[in-house]
């Protein structure tokens, strides 16, 4: 089984202290990393935003954390994960878990990859120290090391 998070979160798919004026800009910035890494087409970004407009802030999965994604047919080229921390947290419309500081964007070519990544993400979210360390990381390499430790321990 592919360890999606550990294999796909690289320094090239991480951005720290990103400025975003609202949730759409935050989703767009995470999506741009998926596009630049070759994992998705530009239209995937629009699809992620449209999913939230249609379904509400279902992508907010925990306090301070959003997990934007869309369907494979919306422009996925290969499995991909990006991670951004926001300079200033933004509201996504989830009163229990706003404001959001960490955005982990995701694309998968099929539902199996989706489930694997979600499973690993759950392991990460259970480790509050790791989540806080990622949110406060000062370097991309620090984020990669934290994620590797959590996935290896899971």
Image (spheres, rainbow, N blue to C red):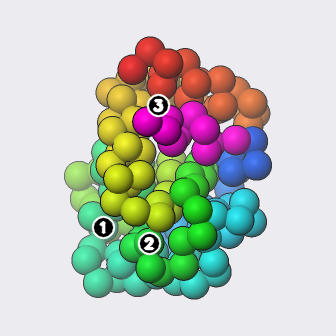
Q: Residue at x 61, y 44 (%)?
A: 8
Q: Secondary structure at mark 3?
A: helix
Depth order, front residue of 74/61: 74
Calculate the distance from the C-alpha at mark 2 to the C-alpha at mark 1.
20 Å
- Residue 129 visible in image: yes
Depth order, front residue of 75/26: 75
138 left or right, relative to 95: right
Image x and y of residue 94, in percent = 28, 61
Residue marked by disc 1: 57
Image x and y of residue 71, in percent = 39, 73
Q: Quadrant of the N terminus?
A: top left
Calculate the distance from the C-alpha at mark 1 to the C-alpha at mark 3.
20 Å
Q: Which residue of the protein is positioned furthest toward the top in this rendering?
A: 153
Image x and y of residue 115, in percent = 32, 49
Comes first in the chain, label 1 or label 3: 1
Q: Residue at x 56, y 52 (%)?
A: 81
Calculate the distance from the C-alpha at mark 2 to the C-alpha at mark 3.
27 Å
Mark 2 or 1, closer to the camera: 2
Depth order, front residue of 24/21: 24
Comes first in the chain, label 2 or label 1: 1
119 left or right, relative to 145: left
In the rendered structure, which segment of residues is drawn in magenta? 1-10
Q: Secondary structure at mark 1?
A: loop
Q: How many marks?
A: 3
Find out whether the residues at labels 2 and 3 contact each other: C-beta distance under 8 Å: no
Q: Residue at x 40, y 39 (%)?
A: 121
Residue marked by disc 3: 131
Residue marked by disc 2: 72
């Amino acid at each position: 089984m592919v360890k999606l998070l550990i294999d796909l979160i690289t320094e090239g798919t991480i951005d720290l202290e990103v400025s975003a004026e609202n949730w759409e800009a935050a989703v767009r910035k995470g999506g741009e990393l998926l596009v630049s890494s070759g994992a998705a087409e530009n239209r995937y970004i629009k699809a992620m935003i449209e999913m939230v407009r249609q379904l509400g802030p279902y992508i907010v999965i925990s306090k301070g954390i959003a997990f934007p994604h869309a369907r494979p047919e919306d422009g996925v080229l290969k499995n991909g994960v990006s991670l951004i921390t926001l300079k200033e947290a933004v509201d996504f419309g989830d009163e229990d878990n706003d404001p959001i500081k960490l955005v982990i964007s995701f694309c998968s070519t099929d539902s199996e990859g989706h489930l694997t990544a979600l499973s690993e993400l759950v392991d990460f979210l259970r480790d509050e120290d790791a989540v806080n360390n990622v949110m406060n990381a000062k370097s991309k390499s620090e984020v990669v090391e934290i994620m590797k430790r959590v996935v290896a321990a899971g």
